Image (spheres, helix red, strand yellow):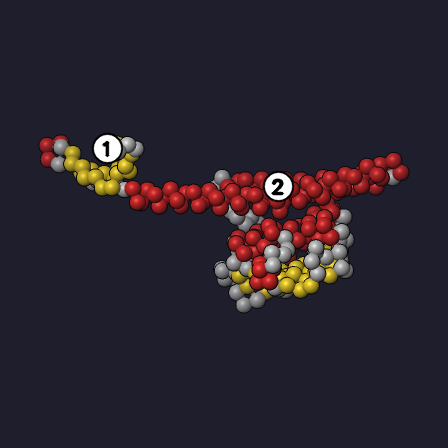
Amino acid sequence: ETDVDARIASPGGGWIPMRWSLAAGDGGQIYAVGRDYAEQAWHQEALIRNEMVELRLRTARELHDGILQTLTGASLQIAVARRLLRDDPEAADQVLATLGEGVSAEQQEMRLYVDEMKGRAAIWTDSTRRIGDRVAALLDRLGAIWGLTTTIETDIEEELGGEVGRQILRIIQESTGNAARHGGARNIQVAIRKGEGSVTIIIRDDGSGFSFLGEYDHDALREQRLGPLSLKHRVEDAGGRIAILSTPDGAVVTVDLPVVSEWKPV
């Protein structure tokens, strides 16, 4: 017995999705029983539409938090190199060389993301590297692109794989870019702490703070529509919570993310 999906013309116009069950009978006859498949087909189309919307949103965030942040920082560093070019060519060359390394690394990240969307790579590549090492490499790139001094501190020794690893990197990347671009920060301190089934990320900067001052938890940020929208959406989509302390002398962004999978011992 074989099932075949096919449409039939509706008397009122349009098409009706049908699922036909085919079976071979004696003497070479083929028997077919058709069932209205409209509701199931509608559900399948709805799932596909939802998946496409989710993919578009995710791609937009990857571009915003990744290559667009990098390009913005790169334009600032090119301006620095142009100012140095006449008086200190060696310093200008160093700025451009460091910038080139950062852009190449970001290009590789985007290539991995594209391969992932094509089904060629896992979400968390090179998952044998500890999260502290991954974040340290990211902060080195961001420091070169934005002209920052960065530090990383973590008590996580286990390997951390899965989607949560990507989220941690992107949250730190966007927070750092926001602090440098909008707050004029020059020093970034990142701490990553292990909790019971969760991980906490703390990003401190010495910039001018957000457009608002004070301390706000996740609920207050949502109710008053405060804080970076893209970052809040990323945290919420990951099932996490965000809190912000904003002062004229700097800001502290704290993010709590659930870790669904078990911690993997080294």
Extreme residue in the left direction: 27
Q: How packed is label 2: few (under 14 Cα within 10 Å), some, or many (20 or more)? A: few
Tell me the quadrant of the picture where the N terminus can be found. top left
Please give the label number shown on residue 11.
Answer: 1
Tell me the quadrant of the picture where the C terminus can be found. bottom right
Judged from the image, the secondary structure of the residue bearing numbered disc 2 is helix
Q: Callout 1, which amino acid?
A: Pro
Which residue corresponds to the image point at 69% horizontal and 58% vertical from the top-left?
212
Judged from the image, the secondary structure of the residue bearing numbered disc 1 is loop
Which residue corresponds to the image point at 87% horizontal and 35% vertical from the top-left?
86
User: Where is residue 205 drawn, in percent x and y?
Assistant: 73, 57
Q: Quadrant of residue 156?
A: bottom right
Which residue corresponds to the image point at 54% horizontal and 68% vertical from the top-left?
196
Q: Which residue is mark 2?
A: 108
Q: Quadrant of residue 161?
A: bottom right
Q: Is 50 in front, or is 9?
A: 9
Q: Is residue 192 visible?
A: no
Q: How packed is label 1: few (under 14 Cα within 10 Å), some, or many (20 or more)? A: few
In the picture, measured across the screen, residue 237 lies left or right of residue 255, that is left
Q: Is residue 15 visible?
A: yes
Q: Earlier in the sequence, mark 2 or mark 1?
A: 1
Q: Callout 2, which amino acid?
A: Gln
In the picture, measured across the screen, residue 7 lies left or right of residue 211, that is left
User: Where is residue 124 drawn, in percent x and y?
Assistant: 54, 50
Q: CA distance from mark 2 to mark 1?
A: 55 Å
Please give the label number shown on residue 172.
Answer: none
User: Where is residue 236 drawn, in percent x and y?
Assistant: 54, 56
Q: Is 4 in front, or is 96?
A: 4
User: Where is residue 17 drawn, in percent x and y?
Assistant: 28, 38
Which residue corresponds to the image point at 60% horizontal and 42% vertical from the top-left?
63
Q: Is 243 in front, or is 261?
A: 243
